[in-house]
Image: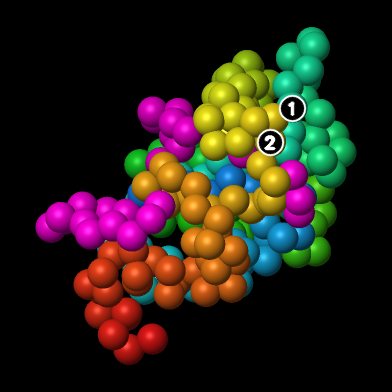
Amino acid sequence: MNKLVSLPFLLLSSFCVLSFGQKLPISIYYESLCPDSSRFITNQLYPAYEYLKDYIALTFVPFGKAESAEGKTFVCQHGQAECSLNMIQSCGLYIRAGNSDEQVEYVNCEMKMPFTNDTNSKICQNKSEDWKIAGCYNGGLGYQLQIEAERITHKIAKPYPSFVPTIVYNSIFDKDLQDRSLTEFANVICEQINNVAPYCSVS
């Protein structure tokens, strides 16, 4: 949709050549109830991750065109339900910090359409995680995670991105890479890593 970090503990260009063992940093700025975000994550990011995960370091930022407001609240493009889900996803990502596989599986689950508002989160987390999510969401941490997401989003675009999702490589926004990533994410990654992944030579 039209009209964007690092929580050091949570939120994990132009052409670049990576040194041995280095991963390509990719930040995904998205909204929890955005159809365009859903299409990109489920149709582009999730399939590409399976083949290229050893070469990329993903950072998910569920905020998009939201804005903080008085009384520790937020105003979101797709309504209050989206504000709640953005915070829930921030919490879900936080408790999975350091495990990219789990974060990708979680976000892909949350972003599948049709959206079912906050009830969708119930099926995307283990029962053992319910209390962690609830504690994060209700205890103030969720709010702080969203404030940090807003701060970092503003480093990319202020007051908010012109398009969501926004895909940023190496902390540098490039409109051409952004536009291409929406339909050929894996190919763009291959170019950015100089085609070093085996997948790149057969795709």
Residue 117 part of the magenta segment: no
Residue 110 is situated, as x and y percent measured from the top left of the image, at 65, 54
Q: Quadrant of residue 97?
A: top left
Q: Position of residue 10 (x, y in %)?
A: 44, 34
Q: Residue at x 40, y 52 (%)?
A: 13
| Dots 1, 2 in contact, CB < 8 A | yes
* In the depicted structure, whether residue 44 falls above or below residue 200: above
- Between 197 and 168, the residue placed more toward the observer is 168
Circle 1 residue = 67
15 within the magenta span: yes
Q: Amino acid at mark 2?
A: Tyr
Determine if residue 138 is in view. yes
The image shows residue 59, relative to residue 66, as above or below, that is below
| Number of other residues with Cα within 10 Å of mark 2, as a class: few under 14, some 14 to 19, many 20 or more | many
- Residue sitting at 49 percent across and 47 percent down? 173
Tell me the quarter of the picture where residue 9 sits. Answer: top left
Q: Position of residue 159 (x, y in %)?
A: 69, 30
Q: Residue at x 61, y 36 (%)?
A: 157
| 201 is higher (above) or lower (below) than 93 | below
The label nearer to you, 1 versus 2, is 2
Q: Which residue is mark 2?
A: 160
| Residue extending farthest right | 79
- Towards the viewer: 74 or 176: 176
**The residue positioned farthest toward the left in the image shown:** 20
* Disc on the earlier residue, 1 or 2: 1
**Which residue is pictured at 52% across the width and 74% down the height?**
184
Could you say whether the residue bearing mark 2 is in a helix, strand or loop? loop
Q: Quadrant of the C terminus?
A: bottom left
The magenta region covers: 1-24
